[in-house]
Amino acid sequence: MVESGVRYLDIGEAEAGQRLDNFLLRVMKGVPRSHIYKILRSGEVRVNKGRVKAQYHLTTGDQVRLPPLRQAEPSPSPTVTAKLADDLRARILYEDERVLVLDKPSGLAVHGGSGIAWGVIEALRALRPDIRELELVHRLDRETSGCLLLSKRRSALRQLHAEIREGGMQKRYLVLAAGAWRGGEQRVDLPLRKNTLRSGERIVCVDKGMGKAAATRFSPLQRFANCTLLEAELESGRTHQIRVHLQAIGHPVLGDEKYGDPDANAALRETGLRRLFLHASLLCFTHPGDQRVLRVEAPLSANLQVLLEDLARRDGRQGGQTLAAS
């Protein structure tokens, strides 16, 4: 462990626009996320000598006071194997001088922490050291695959975060849900509250009293005997939102070990499902440079596509009962 004294950090143009908690998570490497939020709540972190909330957006000229801390030794950069490097390169769906969109594989975390030494962002930084300001614009659960947006410039990150806050970024997912879906499109509007268990595990539940607003639109795409392929469009971006909303209405995501149905998961495991069936299929956003609208899509992986074809054959309907997306 390394012990540091009080530090004062001056915010320049490169850091301006970031939320304070995200800034601290980046500069306080090795400090548990829970401890960072604890020192924010207690007022040990100050901005311009005053107490501020985690959601405060930094501005040029701000001075941030960090209290004395014991931090873990900085983790060495991950060793990116040739196989992983080739896989990550092949998964780049779009890239220019400001943004990069990756088709994240299931099973790879987006960043290190909570017992995970490193994730996508650390691997890409090791693989592409020339990109000095590479940052995650948003996050995906470890077991979720698909479109993951990263910024290559701090100015781009600020603009993209602003677009997310204003609800301008479109995110669509493909999800296989347990049970027979009745009717067409359904909007689920249920507030969600996030808790952290003593073990450090994050758990989210519907809480109409203390939860934060969250809404998801679900549209059926393909019906099978005991499950339904849905397209989910986020109207908000809460942790585990799709998974908890589907659990709440009785159609949990198949392959979900946290919020799912154990019996339904076991039945699909025999068919070949070895992961969470949740895939970020589409991302639509305004380019932070020339302001054009970018639409990036990630196809389903071969194993998930094969699973759908097998389900259709089992139902005796070649191609399943395909429905038009709304």
Image: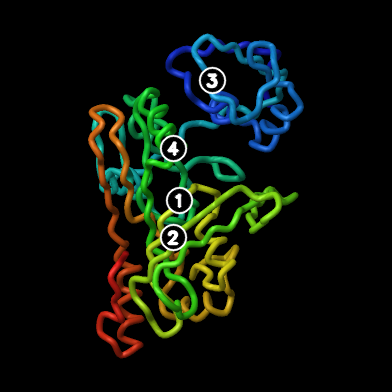
Q: Are marks 3 and 2 in contact (CB under 8 Å)?
A: no
Between 326 and 243, the residue placed more toward the observer is 326
- Residue 36: give its label: none
Q: Tag 4, which secondary structure?
A: loop
Please tell me which of labels 4 and 3 falls first in the chain: 3
Q: Is residue 177 above or below residue 142?
A: below
CB of mark 1 within 8 Å of CB of mark 2? yes
Disc 3: which residue: 58
Q: Looking at the picture, which amino acid does disc 2 mark?
A: Arg
Q: In the rendered image, which residue does mark 2 sit on? A: 217
Q: In percent of the image, x 52 and y 75: which residue is there?
A: 265
Q: Is residue 8 above or below residue 259?
A: above
Residue lying furthest bottom: 316
Residues at marks 3 and 1, CA–CA distance in whole angstroms: 26 Å
Name the amino acid, label 4.
Glu
In the rendered image, which residue does mark 1 sit on? 235
**Mark 1 is on which residue type?**
Glu
Point out the tag, 4 or 1, that comes first from the N-terminus.
4
